[in-house]
Amino acid sequence: MRPSPRLFWLLTGWLIWAVFASLWPALIAYWVAGGITLVLFVAQDGWLAWRQAMPRIVRKAAHSMPVGVWREVSLEIDNPLPQKSVVRVFDHYPPACDMEDLPLTFILAPQTRALASYRLRFTARGEHSFAGIEILVDSPFGLLRRRAFIDAPHRARVYPNFAAVAKYALLATDNHLSQIGVRQRRRRGEGLSFHQLREYREGDTPRQIDWKATARVNKLISREYQDERDQQIMFLLDCGNRMRAKEENSLSHFDEALNALLLLAHVALRQGDAVGCMSFGHDTRLIPARKGHAALNHLMERLFDLEPGSNSPDYRAAATHIAKTVHKRSLVLILTNLRDEDGEELHDAIEVLRRRHLVLLASLRETAVQQLTGQPRNTFETALEAAAALQYISARNATIERLKRSGAYVLDVTPTALPIALVNRYLDFKSSGAL
């Protein structure tokens, strides 16, 4: 039990009355009687509050939620009492959340049910637990509030934000991929594997014409090709300390890389390719390449709680492990945050992978460093920061150029540009026959 604001106001009035009673002794008897009456009312109110049935409350929340997206959690409350009840509710949500609209206040008519909701946004992936629900119920006279803690455990799995994947799937259905920057490579002419026969179209090359089919139907028939299917994509996902970097008002580099991985996995699976992944640098998880619609769900289940650690990435060890375990020629995508000091180790790792695989290094560029070069240099400190940023960018660019000269493909983009850039580069590889 705890006192309500109404009781505090009554006590304040009683104390003010005590001031007047000290000035006019004739009022002391009435002041004492008022105090005794107030104590009896509080005792009676507390006894009634203790005996009355507590409201029943149920939380309704999804078991799966995307990180960084606002979602509603509903609370349904039942008033079993034959009189009006005022209930204040606070839900003990997980710590890794932003929250709006709590606590909630319910004014319930006798024996009725009410539904209200609040919003929360998870700031970290993984499995999170809701604890109980705390309620404060006004006593019949409104002088006290009875506190109760209702045990209502609930576990929610927070996945990467797959909105980009869903958007891609919707646009792919409507053939509007250019709206998100994906350049379609479907060609009328030659490709890599035979797809079907069709009537001749203006622009078809003579090599496409199937003369036997043309002779049978007495009109020009062309062969149509499509990009080769049944290829394999392996992601090497850096879980080292650099991937914890975070741009202003955005997700961490690791979360951006994970979103890009899921989008490209979805695209590759739609193309008929197999997709696998290996994380390195902190938590090593090897997910063998799989095909089909279930492969994307399998990837999400294995990666949704993966977080970057405090270790530095070991590119050589990761490359050696992939070389030993993945025997089919694959497109190996290294998702990392490249630094200039990585040149030697990355060069060796890429050389190990290039013996069998096609390698693409996708590095996330830190925009904060680029912004330092454009700031006004009014003081010695700002000039020093700009000079250090320029030196870092120059050394990093030199490392990237060296990797390109050694035969590696390098994609150096900002975190937010990574998903679409990866998809476009993958489609380039498919259409060119490099894989």
Image: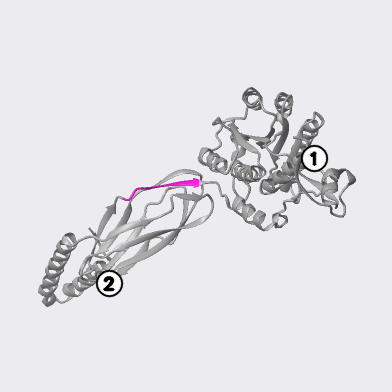
What secondary structure is the magenta-colored segment mainly? strand
Check disc 2 and report the residue beneath it: 109
The three-letter code of the residue at mark 1 reads Ser
Residue situated in front as seen by the camera: 190 or 429: 190
Task: Give residue 66's position: percent from left, percent from top.
Answer: 52, 50
Q: Which colour style is shown?
A: one colour
Quadrant where the image shows the N terminus: bottom left
How busy is the neighbourhood of tag 1: few (under 14 within 10 Å), some, or many (20 plus)?
few
Q: Is 317 on the left or on the right of 19, as rendered?
A: right
Q: Is residue 21 above or below residue 67?
A: below
The segment highlighted magenta reads 152-158
Quadrant where the image shows the C terminus: top right
The three-letter code of the residue at mark 2 reads Ala
Whether residue 249 is visible, yes or no, is no
Check disc 1 and report the residue beneath it: 432
Q: How many numbered badges does the structure rendering display? A: 2
Residue situated in front as seen by the camera: 55 or 20: 55
Q: Is 183 on the left or on the right of 110, as rendered?
A: right
Q: SS of the residue at dot 1? A: helix
Task: Give residue 380's position: percent from left, percent from top.
Answer: 74, 44
Whether residue 422 is visible, yes or no, is yes
Task: Give residue 282's position: percent from left, percent from top.
Answer: 56, 31
395 inside magenta stretch: no
Residue situated in front as seen by the camera: 280 or 271: 271
Alpha carbon distance from label 2 to label 1: 70 Å
153 inside magenta stretch: yes
Task: Give residue 262's position: percent from left, percent from top.
Answer: 60, 44
How busy is the neighbourhood of tag 2: few (under 14 within 10 Å), some, or many (20 plus)?
some
Q: Is 360 on the left or on the right of 265, as rendered?
A: right
